[in-house]
Image: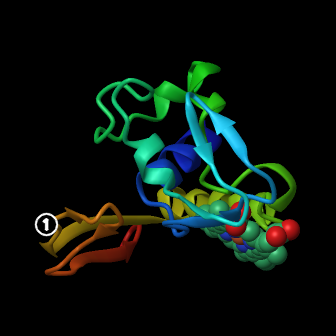
């Protein structure tokens, strides 16, 4: 389940808003030609927030990762030959963080939380959370 929470987190809040590629030869794709030498900007949010791919895309729903189809278009860590070298390391760190957060701490939202998407996720008024060790 932790892995599903992590996937859902990076789907909604990716730290890599765009990726660049250069067409080395003319590329035909769905009736369009990308001429050799052109640069292409890939915007993962255009895919991750597409309601045809991820139903109700702005909802935080880790359960959607029970469906193998959710993985088909997932590109938070890129893809192909330039796939993120730190993907597993990052997921491990997030899993450790989440484990200690939910087992050792409790938290409450203090202030902010207004969300703006450009399509990057941003909190213009900040997002302040008070975290306390359990039992304190
Ligand atoms: C949540 C955390 C992270 C995300 C979302 C992320 C995302 C990405 C993405 C999308 C790419 C592909 C860029 C492209 O295709 O042009 C990439 C590449 C890369 N990432 Fe990450 N990354 C994360 C953490 C890390 C960490 C912690 C490391 C190192 C310890 C790392 C090392 C790399 C390296 C070396 C590449 C280049 C791989 C190559 O070009 O062969 N990343 N990352």
Where 41 sits versus 127, above or below? above
Residue 71, position in %: x, y?
64, 31
The N terminus - image quarter: top right
* Residue under the image location 36 percent in, 66 percent down: 120
Q: How many marks?
A: 1
Residue that mark 1 sits on: 114
In the picture, which quadrant includes the C terminus? bottom left
Instruction: Categorize mark 1 by other alpha carbons within 10 Å: few (<14), some (14-19), many (20+).
Output: few
Seen in the picture, residue 123 relative to 83 is either above or below; the reply is: below
From the viewer's perspective, is residue 67 above or below residue 94? above
Q: Would residue 20 appear left or right of 89 to someone viewing this image?
A: left
Q: Position of residue 65 (x, y in %)?
A: 56, 29
Q: Residue at x 42, y 29 (%)?
A: 54
Q: Quadrant of ligand 1?
A: bottom right
Quadrant assignment, res 23: bottom right
Looking at the image, which residue is at 55% across and 29% down? Answer: 31
Spot occupied by residue 32 in the image (x, y as percentages of width and height): 55, 37
Q: Nearer the viewer, residue 87 or 50?
A: 50
* Location of residue 87 (image quadrant): bottom right
Residue 2 in view in this figure: no
Asked if residue 111 shows in the view, the reply is yes
Give the color scheme: rainbow, by chain, secondary structure or one colour.
Answer: rainbow
What secondary structure is found at the residue carrying circle 1?
loop
Q: Nearer the viewer, residue 77 or 20?
A: 20
Residue at x 74%, y 49% (from the top left corner): 26
**Is the shortest distance between ligand 1 and the CB of mark 1 under 8 Å?**
no
Front residue of 133/36: it is 36
């Amino acid at each position: 389940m932790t892995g599903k929470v992590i996937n859902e987190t990076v789907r909604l809040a990716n730290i890599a808003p765009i990726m660049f590629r250069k067409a080395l030869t003319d590329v035909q794709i769905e009736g369009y030609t990308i001429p050799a030498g052109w640069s292409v900007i890939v915007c993962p949010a255009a895919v991750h927030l597409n309601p045809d791919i991820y139903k109700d895309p702005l909802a935080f729903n880790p359960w959607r990762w029970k469906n193998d189809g959710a993985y088909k278009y997932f590109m938070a860590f890129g893809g192909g030959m330039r796939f993120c070298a730190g993907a597993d390391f990052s997921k491990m760190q997030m899993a450790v963080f989440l484990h200690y957060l939910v087992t050792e701490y409790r938290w409450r939202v203090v202030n902010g939380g207004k969300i703006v998407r450009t399509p990057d996720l941003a909190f213009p008024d900040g997002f302040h959370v008070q975290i306390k060790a359990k039992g304190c």
